[in-house]
Image (cartoon, helix red, strand yellow):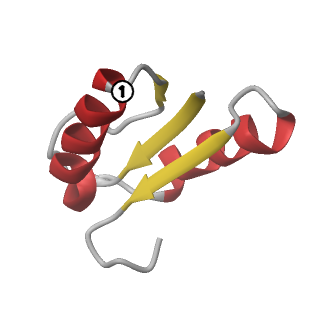
Amino acid sequence: MRIAMAADHGGFALKEALKAVLAEQGHEVVDFGTHDTTMVDYTDFAAPAARAVASGECERGIFCCGTGLG
């Protein structure tokens, strides 16, 4: 399965952990970022990932943020 992933700085560590597990299970992960813990706006990464799911480029999406509201 092709899975879009996105996170803000607060969800970065969780995204990376989930990404590793999904890859071990044979899923293709498309990582839309963020790629470190530098403070960023969640929507800058979640919006392109959501568009990838909506367009069918990715079958599912997982989004991680520091507040849990994402």
* Left or right: 22 in relation to 30: left
As drawn, the residue found furthest toward the right would be 55
* Left or right: 64 in relation to 47: left
* Rendered residue at 35%/77% (across/down): 68
The percent coordinates of residue 6 (x first, y second) are 44, 45
* Rendered residue at 26%/57% (across/down): 11
Graded by Cα atoms within 10 Å as few (under 14), some (14 to 19) or many (20 or more), the crowding at tag 1 reads few
The image shows residue 63, relative to residue 32, as above or below, that is: below
The percent coordinates of residue 43 (x first, y second) are 53, 57
Q: Could you tell me which quadrant the N terminus lies in? A: top right
The percent coordinates of residue 15 (x first, y second) are 28, 45
The image shows residue 26, relative to residue 19, as above or below, that is: above
Q: Nearer the viewer, residue 56 or 70?
A: 56
* Rendered residue at 55%/34% (across/down): 3
Q: Quadrant of residue 58?
A: top right
Amino acid type, label 1: Gln
Q: Which residue is mark 1?
A: 25
The image shows residue 68, relative to residue 41, as above or below, that is: below
Q: Quadrant of residue 20?
A: top left
* Rendered residue at 33%/39% (across/down): 34
* Left or right: 46 in relation to 36: right
The image shows residue 39, relative to residue 24, as above or below, that is: below
* Left or right: 40 in relation to 58: left
